[in-house]
Amino acid sequence: MCGIVGYVGRRAALPVIIDGLRRLEYRGYDSAGVAVSANGRVGVTKTKGRIDTLCEKIAREGVPDSTVGIGHTRWATHGRPSDANAHPHTDCRGMLAVVHNGIIENYLPLRHRLEAAGHRFRSETDTEVIPHLIESHYDGDLVEAVRRATAELEGSYAFVALRVDEPDRLVAVRKDSPLVVGLGEGENFLASDIPAILPHTRKVIILEDGETAVVERGRVVVVDPRGAPVARSPLEIDWNVEAAEKGGYPHFMLKEIFEQPACLRQTLAGRLVPGGPRSPSVTGLVFDSGVLDTERVRALDRIFVTACGTAFHAGLAGKHFMERLARLPVEADIASEFRYRDLVLGPGDVLVVVSQSGETADTLAALREAARRGGRTVAVTNVVGSSVAREADEVIYTRAGPEIAVASTKAYTAQLLALVLLACHLGVARGTFAPERAAALLEEVKALPSLAREVLDGAGDIRETARLLAGWDDVFYIGRGLDWAVAMEGQLKLKEISYIHAEAYPAGELKHGTLALIEEDVPVIAVVTQPDLREKTISNIREVKARGGHVIAVAAADDEEIADHADEVIRLPVTHPLLMPVLAAIPLQLLAYYAAVERGCDVDKPRNLAKSVTVE
Ligand code: AGP
C-alpha cells in the first residue's frame, strides 16, 4: 500500500501535496517524493525516509513554484527503500512523472523490452516501467499514451501521470488499487484515500476499476476502459479525518480484517508462473529473491521455523505445510526459546523466520544465531528493507501493506499464504509434491481472496456470538494439527485485545487436565476444518458437551455432522485443507474484535502491548 496525492488548481501545489501525503502516511512511510511541472520541466524531489525528511530536502534544494503536482509516500514492495526507488519516477527525458500504488506483475519483461529499445532505468522498482511505457507511446496526447500503456500492464495499479508540456492536467488510472478524485472550486485533487482530500473538499468521485480520470483545474472527465465518458455524480463525504484514515471503519483492526482479500491478492501477485508447476526446476512459483534454488532445496536435511506471537502461529501452520509437501522434518519453536538453545545446525539446515515488522528482537536474534552456526536463513516478512529482510539469505515479502493495529490480522493470513507457496515450491523442487497436485493446489490458492470475502460477508452473525464470549472470563480453544495452530492464533487475538483469559489446547490434550476446568456453559471454540482429524476432534467436542461446555465450532460448509455436536457452527467455504487455516482465522479475528468492542477495550492500542517488540 502506498499513498498518492495529485493537485491541479489555482494555489501553490506543493503545500497541498505535502499536507495530503502526511494524511496518507499510514499507507506507507519508507520513502516519499513530489513532482511539479514548472518552467518547461518536471521538477522531482524525493528521498528515503518519512515526509519530514522529504520536507527537509525540499527546504535545502527548493522546488519550483507550480499549481500542478503529484506526490507519493511509499510502502516498498519491489526494491528496498532508497532515494532512487522513491516515487515519483520519470521517463528518460524528464518530461513525464508518475506516482503509483500497486504491483506491476509483468514489469520485468516490459523493462527488458524498453531497455532493449534504449530506455534508461534508474531504480529497482516495478513502477518505473510506467513512465517509460507512456513515453514509448507518447505522440502528443498524454491521455492516449496512458491508455495504450495501461493496456500492456498486468497487476494492480493506481497511478497518476504528469507531463510538462500538458501542464494543466493530470491523468490517473485505477485497477485494484484505490484512487479518488476530489472536486474543488477552480481546483481538483487526486488521492489514494479520502483523508488527503477532506481539508479541501467533501465532494469525491471514487474511481472504479479500469477507469481513467483526466483532471484539470476546471474540469474532470472520467472515461471507462473503452474511452467512453462515464457520468458519475460525486459523493458527499461526511466523515471526519480520523474516520477517513480508517476508511470509515471504527478501528484500524476492523479495516485490516476486511482488507484481507485484497492483501491475499497482493501476496499472490506476480508469484504464479504462467503454465504452473511443471518440474523440479519449474516449480510454478517465483519469489522476491531466488528462494532456495533446486540444488539447495534437494540438499536440505531439516527445516526450523521460528517467530514470536501471531507470526509464530503462522510458523506453526507452516511446519505442517512443509512437512506434508516437502517431506522434511520441520521444527517450529518460539524465537525467544530458539535463540538460547544449544543448536545443532549444519549446512543442510534452513531456518525460516516469520515477522510482520521484520524488527522483533528475539526473532532477529534467532536469525543471527542460526546464521552464525552455519544454517541458511529465509525471512517471511511484511516490511521491505527491514532488519530480517536485510540479514536473511532469502526473503519472501507478504505485501500486506502497513499494519497499524497492534493485533496482527492481515499480515498473519498473508504469512500463511506465503508459507503455503514456499512449501509448494519446496515440495515440487524436491519431487515430493507432484506438479499436477501442486497445480491443483495453486488453482485453489487463486480463489482464496474471494473465499475470504465470503467469510467476511458473515461478520454480522459472528458479532452475535462474540457477545456471549464478552461475558466470560475464561474461553478455551481446541483443534488438532493445523486446526490447533489456528486455535493458538484465535486465543491470542481474544486475549490481547479483550483481556479475556483464553487458552488453546491440542484437542487430544483436554482429558490430560484441562477438562477439569470445563463446566456448565464454559465457552469452547473448536476449530474443525481438517478432514483427516475431524472425527477425533468431534469426540473431544462430545467430551466437552458431556461436562456442560458451550461449544462454538468453526467448520467447513459441507460438514453435515458438526451441527449435531456443537451448540453453534461458524461455517467456512470449502477449499484445500492446507488453505482452510486462512479462512478459519477470519471468524476468530472477528470474534476477538467484537468481544473487545463489547467490553469497551482500546482495540487498536491494547494495554501493555506494542506493535513491534524491538526489545527482549
Ligand atoms: C500479534 O497480534 C501481536 N501483535 C504480536 O504477537 C506479534 O505477532 C509479535 O510481536 C511478532 O511481531 P512480528 O510479526 O512483527 O515479528
Image: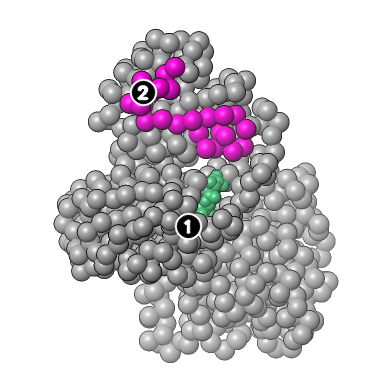
Q: In this rendering, is residue 150 above or below 445?
A: below
The colour style of the image is one colour
Name the secondary structure under disc 2: helix
Membership of 493 in magenta stretch: yes
* Disc sitting over residue 512 in the figure: 2
Rendered residue at 69%/84% (across/down): 43
- Relative placement, left or right, of 359 versus 296 is right
Helix, strand or loop: magenta stretch = helix
- Across and down, in percent, residue 212 comes to 58, 62
| CA–CA distance in space, label 1 to label 2 | 32 Å
Query: In the rendered view of the protein, which quadrant contains the C terminus?
Result: bottom right
Q: Is residue 127 visible?
A: no
Residue lying farthest front?
342
Question: Which residue corresponds to mark 1?
Answer: 363
Q: Nearer the viewer, residue 150 or 63?
A: 63
- Relative placement, left or right, of 193 versus 535 is right
Residue type of the residue flagged with mark 1: Thr
Rendered residue at 31%/18% (across/down): 539
Q: Which residues are magenta?
A: 491-516
Rendered residue at 65%/78% (across/down): 46
* Disc sitting over residue 537 in the figure: none
Rendered residue at 71%/69% (across/down): 51
Name the secondary structure under disc 1: helix
